[in-house]
Image: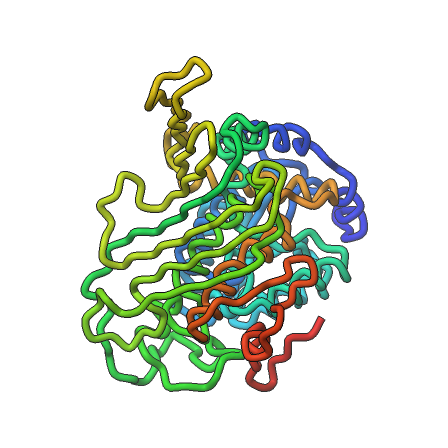
Amino acid sequence: MKTQTTRRQFLGTSAVGVAALWLGRPAAQGSTVAAAPSETVNLGLIGCGGEGRAVATAHQGLPDARIVAVCDVNKRRLEEAKALFEKSGGTGTVAAYDDYRRLLDRKDIDAVIVATNDHWHVLPTIHACQAGKDVYVEKPLGVCIAEGQAAVKAADKYQRIVQIGTQQRSWPHYQKAAEIIQSGQLGIITEVRVWDFDCMYPGFGSPPDSDPPAELNWDFWLGPAPKVPYNPNRYNHFYWFFDYGGGWQVDWAVHHYQVVHWFLQTKGPISAAAMGGFYCFENTNTEWPDSFVGICEYGPTPVAPKGFVLQYTFSGAARRQRRSHAKCFYGTKGSMLIDRSGFTITWEAGENREPKDETTVENEFKKDTHIASLQAHARVFLDSIKSRQKPPADVLVGHQATNPGHLMNIAWKLGRKIRWDPEKEEIVGDSEAAALLSKPYRAPWKLEV
């Protein structure tokens, strides 16, 4: 059908594949049979960097999705993405825009992928909801907690499907691990250690400010952030600057926190503390520390009846670990070490088990792990669009998973422990810390829902 009304009626009622995905079946790979036009979800990509192209490629590899428009403030990236999806899609011209608001004006676009740099995650998400589009937004959900709260409010107000890009939520071995922990097989959980080790020595240097590249609209890239001169590190390593990201403890670790919250069935911590500094990098103009340790306390949960402690570590000086980006859940009957390659349980002695007895489960994605994992998550998103059922990694889950890193960062900036009410989403008894829950926006941009 060609009319917009008919397309949306279909996309609001079809629930093909949802039940199977909820039960953990991986997405079908390699299908080349295109869906009927009325069943196809037309997608726009906002942010055409490497991860954005990967996420969009994963969607377009499914039979009922098609990339019809792309947007970026970098002309070179924009042209590359347009050419890529015209070639891979085989469905004709892909529209290209340098302003995402023009893309959102398109009535034939059902949903968008927001894969910009982090300080641009929330505004396009809100504006897409207002335009009647569903959203797949990359993590983290905002560079402050107030942004995440606004995104949650927008999805609810405009009744849109918003899924965050924590793709492990759709992986079979993570789903199996969740079942094991939630069934009590590891006993009572008392602690979770989370870490990211990635050798970046000697750091990124301290290049001088300069004119932006001719292909880049620097003022639009800055958007709601303060107006400053172009600097190569601000653009290429935005994670490391206060105005555009939250360091690895936010920008990457959201993946980890989402898994911890899911496995242990919690909404968030009750306190946070952190320390760290520049102990690794040589001369650098970046701002977040290259070595960081944060601790969050959590209240009681079904498998942690006395509460538990989450400890996060980032090191920019080391990578030679058994698993460089991983989590370990410590229980009274056993401990589970899990990452994208699979998980290993080391059982405590007793109950017919020998000391150091182990159980190992491997990742089911044997080839093209990154795209395959993204495609599993894309399948859930497309089925949620059609069923109008919230996906497991919906916007609220993504917001709650972003909060621990933000709270650690606030504690690090202030140099003291802070308390958090995860139900009211308020900092308790510390007005100076509460002021850091939001950030001012540069005109004309406004955080309005």
Task: Out of 364 and 33, give the one closest to the viewer.
Answer: 364
Q: Position of residue 377 (x, y in %)?
A: 54, 41
Q: Residue at x 63, y 38 (%)?
A: 302
Q: Residue at x 55, y 39 (%)?
A: 263
Q: Position of residue 159 (x, y in %)?
A: 76, 56
Residue 401, relative to residue 275: is it above or below?
Answer: above
Q: Residue at x 67, y 54 (%)?
A: 134
Q: Residue at x 33, y 21 (%)?
A: 355
Visible residue check, residue 43: no
Task: Out of 433 and 365, give the one closest to the viewer.
Answer: 433
Q: Position of residue 432 (x, y in %)?
A: 55, 79
The quarter of the rendered structure image containing the N terminus is top right
Horizontal arrangement in the rendering, residue 155 relative to residue 137 (left or right) = right
Residue 448, relative to residue 336: is it above or below?
Answer: below
Q: Position of residue 228 (x, y in %)?
A: 41, 86
The quarter of the rendered structure image containing the C terminus is bottom right
Visible residue check, residue 417: yes
Seen as rendered, the residue at the extreme top is 352
Instruction: Report the label total.
Output: 0
Task: Out of 23 and 149, give the one closest to the viewer.
Answer: 149
